[in-house]
Amino acid sequence: LVVALYFSWQITLMCLVTVPIMAFSFYMILQSGAGNDGLLGKEAYEAAANIADETLSSMPTIASFGGETKAAKRYEGHLGEAEDSAIRQSKKLGLGTGFLWGSFFGMMGIGFWWGGHLTIQSREQAMINNPIPADFETNDIYAVNRAIADE
């Protein structure tokens, strides 16, 4: 940042406009992994695993009473909760990653646009400070240089 400010403080300040969007995207990415959705998904998978364990450990009893479909529905219910939380978690991660890349490309676009603007502005200022002489093409020095270049 210090080096960028030294070389072109104007471009650096223009690019810093996207930093709050980057910070928000990092927050969203961190929330996707450390938020409540991951905890809810873990708890739902644990509940489903407990149902599967208790069903498999007492399979002869469940089979004798015809409770396979009931156990399967209980298992699928907990898997549905885990799936929903995983989908919410993935949406947050995708949105945060999209904002991160969007702000990155926005920063590059602003830098190129403003850098081009500054280049054009400096060229115009250079033309004002050092105008081309009116007799440029009829000047003897120009004719000598043109003859050397044509050889």
Image (cartoon, helix red, strand yellow):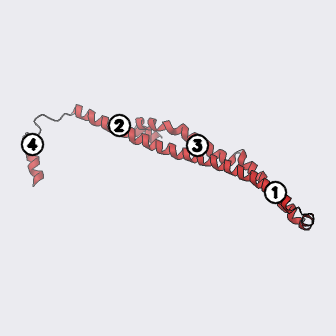
N-terminal label among 4 and 1: 1
Q: State whether residue 131 is above or below residue 143.
A: above
Residue 79, by quadrant, is bottom right
> Helix, strand or loop at disc 3?
helix
Indicate left or right for 99 with 130 as reference: right
Total numbered badges shown on the rendered structure: 4
N-terminal label among 2 and 4: 2
Residue at (60% x, 49% y) in the render: 94
Residue 71, by quadrant, is bottom right
Amino acid of disc 2: His
Question: How far from the left and from the top, in percent, is residue 133?
Answer: 14, 34
CB under 8 Å between discs 1 and 3:
no
Q: Nearer the viewer, mark 2 or mark 4?
A: 2
* Residue wearing tag 1: 73
* Mark 2 and mark 3: Cα distance apart in space: 29 Å
Label at residue 25: 3
